[in-house]
Image (cartoon, rainbow, N blue to C red):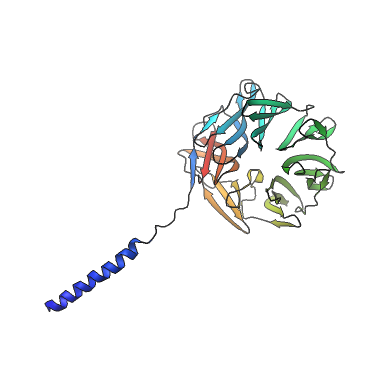
């Protein structure tokens, strides 16, 4: 009996010696990174966020405006890879006005500035800030785009649509295709490859600049739809997003051009989703903020082909409204910038990051 017990004990020791190393070698389950909150120096509420752009993980700029006793005043924030700080060194920082879209042009940062009704482009280089004024004032400044060797500002004055073009040495006015009533959005990949969203006499359309003229790109937009944003990849792929309306009910759509054909999809997101904040993330998918079903957390949609998934920002104590307004790819991470309202106080600025 004692001999049998000894044999059993030996077998157990041998099994433990064989199994333990294998068990110890099992890798820990992978943990997917989540959204984290980034502190933002406060602004004077109420405020509005205009744009967010990043060049890698160590430089990002966010624009908007805040309310002062003199009216709306521009606000500008810079991310240095570690923290957000406010920049008040640009021309007109202490004057009434608004900041719009941010663009990276070579080593410079270009930002559209409505300075008391007059338009100009702020340019920041290693030597500091300079301003490039527009050749004329417009009633409405709709959008701005810039690339090396070219910039565009679209808007309206008392004579109608204005499509202003800067070629590196001076400004000129470019004619729009016949039937175009106004242009409300513009983006560019190069000086000879720009895209714009427009309203024509027959409905909404996408326009293309090929270096010679603006032409209707003949994008098959859904009936009764509009265009919120247009993205252009370095590869030349074009993606536009907007809303289609049927009996007053909105449905979000995404249309993509691969250089030959257009393809339209309808991602599974809330119908009132505004796609202006849509970007292509470091994973190749489309990302955009959506209306959250949780008052204390933001919500983001990830669109990869026919599949849409969602993620939430960090929980914010006593928050009653968390609204990321703009998204940007920052290296291997995503960043957002927007507003958050805490119970008992007015809305203030918020920023979040996924990855990094």
Residue 274 visible? The answer is no
Please tell me whether residue 5 is drawn above or below residue 350 in the rendered image.
below
Left or right side of 320 for 26: left
**Extreme-left residue of the structure:** 2
In depth, the one of 88 and 235 nearer the eye is 235
Which one is nearer the viewer's eye here, 326 or 345?
A: 326
Q: Is residue 59 left or right of residue 168?
A: left
What count of labels does the image hold? 0
Residue in the picture at 60% in, 34% down: 62
Residue 340 coordinates in the image, percent (x, y): 53, 37
Looking at the rendered image, the quarter that the N terminus falls into is bottom left
Residue 270 in the image: x percent, y percent? 61, 51
Image height of 5 relative to 129, above or below: below
Q: Is residue 23 shown to the viewer in this render?
A: yes
In the image, residue 201 lies at what x, y percent? 85, 45
Q: Position of 311 compared to 183: left or right?
A: left
Could you say where residue 101 lies in the image, as x and y percent from the top left? 67, 35
Q: Quadrant of residue 147?
A: top right
């Amino acid at each position: 009996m004692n001999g049998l017990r000894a044999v059993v004990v030996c077998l157990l020791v041998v099994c433990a010696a064989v199994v333990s190393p294998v068990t110890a070698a099992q890798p820990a389950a992978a943990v997917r990174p989540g959204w984290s909150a980034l502190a933002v120096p406060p602004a004077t509420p109420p405020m509005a966020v205009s744009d967010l752009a990043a060049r890698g993980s160590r430089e990002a700029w966010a624009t908007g405006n805040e309310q002062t006793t003199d009216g709306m005043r521009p606000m500008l924030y810079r991310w240095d890879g570690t923290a957000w700080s406010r920049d008040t060194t640009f021309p007109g920082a202490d004057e009434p006005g608004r900041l719009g879209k941010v663009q990276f042009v070579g080593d410079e940062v270009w930002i559209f500035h409505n300075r008391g009704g007059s338009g100009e482009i702020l340019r920041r280089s290693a030597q500091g800030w300079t301003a490039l004024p527009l050749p004329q004032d417009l009633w409405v400044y709709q959008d701005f785009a810039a690339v090396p060797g070219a910039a565009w500002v679209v808007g309206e004055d008392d004579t109608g649509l204005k499509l202003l073009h800067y070629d590196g040495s001076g400004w000129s006015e470019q004619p729009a295709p016949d039937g175009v009533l106004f242009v409300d959005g513009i983006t560019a990949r190069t000086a000879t490859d720009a895209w714009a969203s427009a309203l024509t006499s027959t409905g909404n359309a996408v326009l293309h600049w090929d270096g010679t003229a603006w032409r209707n790109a003949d994008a098959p937009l859904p009936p009764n739809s509009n265009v919120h944003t247009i993205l252009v990849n370095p590869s030349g792929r074009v993606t536009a997003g907007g809303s289609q309306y049927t009996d007053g009910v909105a449905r979000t759509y995404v249309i993509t051009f691969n250089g030959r054909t257009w393809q339209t999809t309808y991602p599974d997101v809330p119908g009132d989703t505004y796609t202006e904040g849509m970007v292509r993330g470091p994973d190749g998918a489309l990302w955009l903020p959506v209306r959250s079903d949780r008052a204390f957390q933001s919500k983001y949609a990830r669109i990869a082909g026919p599949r849409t998934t969602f993620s939430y920002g960090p929980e914010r104590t006593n928050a009653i409204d968390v609204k990321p307004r703009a998204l940007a790819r920052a290296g291997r991470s995503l960043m957002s910038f927007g507003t958050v309202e805490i119970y008992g106080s007015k809305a203030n600025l918020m920023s979040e990051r996924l990855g990094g």
